[in-house]
Image: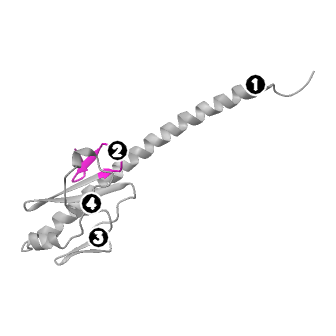
Amino acid sequence: MRRGFTLVEMLVVLAIIGVLAAALSFGFSSARRQALLTQAAAHGGEVSMALNAFLIRNVDLNLDTWTASLPAGSLAGAPPALAGLSGFDCKGAATLTPSGMSSGGQSWAAAPDAVGCLVERVGNRFLVHTWVRDLPNHFVNGRSN
């Protein structure tokens, strides 16, 4: 009698391993997506709190002049619900000053690569829009919208 496995037995084992690998990769991608959504919400909340604290400390700030000096934001990868919005970029690490915004991260840290961020001015307040690229969800001031 010969020892070893037949070709059919080997193919069955490979098929089972393939099914298990596919199931695991689906579970991991779902967890990764949820982690990115959580990071987007957290970044929006961080930027929103930093802006509110900055505005409280700088009550006499002329918002028209101040926002004109800020870098324009991008809606790259944003969900269709955000189409047409304009504002300034909040994706990178930033330090807010009365003369504008500089890099450095004293006000907020940089967003993860897959997260987009745009600050929209509405009167005397700001709405921080964050999203994960190419996903339909988005957040306003760190809260699900």
Left/right of residue 99 with respect to residue 89 in the rendered view: left
Q: Do the CB atoms of the residues marked 4 and 3 lie less than 8 Å apart? A: no
- Name the quadrant of the N terminus: top right
Q: What percent of the width, then of the height, locates residue 122?
A: 10, 58
Looking at marks 4 and 1 on the same chain, the residue that comes earlier in the sequence is marked by 1
- Residue 135, labelled with which disc? 2
Question: Given the image, on which type of amino acid does mark 4 rest?
Answer: Glu
Alpha carbon separation for disc pair 1 and 2 = 42 Å
Question: Given the image, on which type of amino acid does mark 3 rest?
Answer: Ala
Looking at marks 2 and 3 on the same chain, the residue that comes earlier in the sequence is marked by 3
Residue occupied by mark 4: 46
Q: What are the residue bounds of the magenta stretch?
A: 131-145
Residue occupied by mark 3: 94
Q: Do the CB atoms of the residues marked 2 and 3 lie less than 8 Å apart? A: no
Residue farthest top in this picture:
1
Q: Secondary structure at mark 3?
A: strand
Q: What percent of the width, then of the height, locates residue 36?
A: 38, 50
Question: Given the image, on which type of amino acid does mark 2 rest?
Answer: Leu
Q: Quadrant of residue 102?
A: bottom left
Q: Nearer the viewer, residue 59 or 76?
A: 76
